Image (cartoon, grey):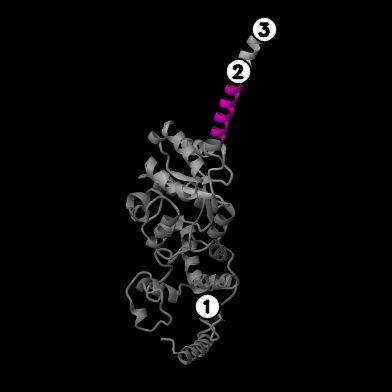
Amino acid sequence: MKTNFKLRKKYTIPAVLCVLVIVGLLGYYFLSALSNQEDTTYLYIDRDDTVDSVFTKMAPVCANHAFGGFKTLVRHGSYADHIHTGRYAIEPGENAYTVYKRLKNGLQTPINLTVPSVRTLDRLSMEVGKKLMIDSAEIYQALTDPSVYQKYGYDSTTICCMFIPNTYDMYWNVGIDAFLDRMKKESEKFWNADRLAKAKAMELTPNEVITLASIVEEETANDGEKPTIAGLYYNRLRKGMLLQSDPTVKYALKQFGLRRIYNYHLQVDNPYNTYRYAGLPPGPIRIPSVVGIDAVLNYAHHDYLYMCAKEDFSGTHNFARTVGEHLQNAARYYVALNKRGIH
């Protein structure tokens, strides 16, 4: 019996030591922190990525020994045959096995996509393309494709009305169809019963509200003034007056940097030129903010018909009820422009 005990002890101790070494190695390579960073980092995997390119993207933020364990898991698993595109978080302290399972199962971390308030579809496409896997050219092509914008109930001049400048959670690798479907859904959510009722009371469609809001937004960055300007343009619309909005001329000319509008600018024959064409332009001259849209829906009730930028260049305006008052305001502003040499 004593001999058997000695034999068991002789083989048990090395076996235990071997197990401990194996456990230690497994822990060292597979269960220790993969990231060498103090903050969360993000891995972006696109359609062209292979196992090797994924390794290359991860290498700068990974600890050598844990990264070796991650590679071992990849090479002995099925990940190489099923690489999921997307944006994946690598948290401080997470082990190689946890990150491997996340990538293998396609468990992405959503992004916060903010739809920008911009003037043109190409700019919208470029800004959105910076945040998503979709190429900006693909976005622009979709937005200018009649079969696409007609599907959502818009035309070439109003498709930008579908985009409400808010921040949305979505996956980085969202496809173009899913992205546009989401934007349409968010637009319908934005146009709730209250907003629709206010638009109806104004005898304007949501697209017309957005178009008017885009003019208001181009006229001022002062949120407090927006309802007053909205009320002014709405007064002109109701009276059948030309809107005579300088920003629409800039849009027609595609010269957004103009600081002074001269008479020859006003002669451009373009439906966006509200000095020549009555009513609202065919569509928005920018994607207006939610503040701008709500300023139109909650426009200030007054009898102003004219406005001119203040001569102190504060970004606010002098408002007038009559042409005579307006001409006095305009004269002071032109004197200030000349003094500053603004042409």
Left or right: 334 in relation to 139: right
Q: Is residue 152 above or below residue 232?
A: above
C-beta proximity under 8 Å, tags 2 and 3? no
Q: Earlier in the sequence, mark 2 or mark 3?
A: 3
Q: Secondary structure at mark 1?
A: loop
Please name whichever residue, 307 or 79, is drawn nearer the observer in this view of the structure.
79
Residue 17 on the magenta span: yes
Element at badge 2? Answer: helix
* Figure check: 310 above or below 128: below
Residue 43 position within the rendered picture, expressed as x and y whole percent measured from the top left? 47, 47
In the figure, is residue 110 to the left or right of 176? right
**Circle 3 residue:** 1
Expressed as whole percent of the image width and height from the top left, the position of residue 77 reads: 43, 31
The three-letter code of the residue at mark 1 reads Leu
Q: Quadrant of the N terminus?
A: top right
Residue contact at pointers 1 and 3, CB within 8 angstroms: no
160 relative to 96, above or below: below
**Tag 2 residue:** 10
Q: Residues within 10 Å of mark 1 (few under 14, many from 20)?
A: many
Q: 28 or 115, which is in the foreground?
A: 28
Name, please, the residue furthest toward the front: 3
Numbered mark located on residue 305 in the image? 1
At horizontal 51% and vertical 61% (from top left) the residue drawn is 203
Tell me how far mark 2 sits from mark 3, CA to CA. Answer: 14 Å
Q: Of label 1 and label 3, which has the lower sequence position?
A: 3
Q: Residue at position x 38%, y 42% from top? A: 52
Q: Amino acid at mark 2?
A: Lys
In x, y percent, where is residue 106? 47, 38
Q: CA distance from mark 1 to mark 3?
A: 111 Å
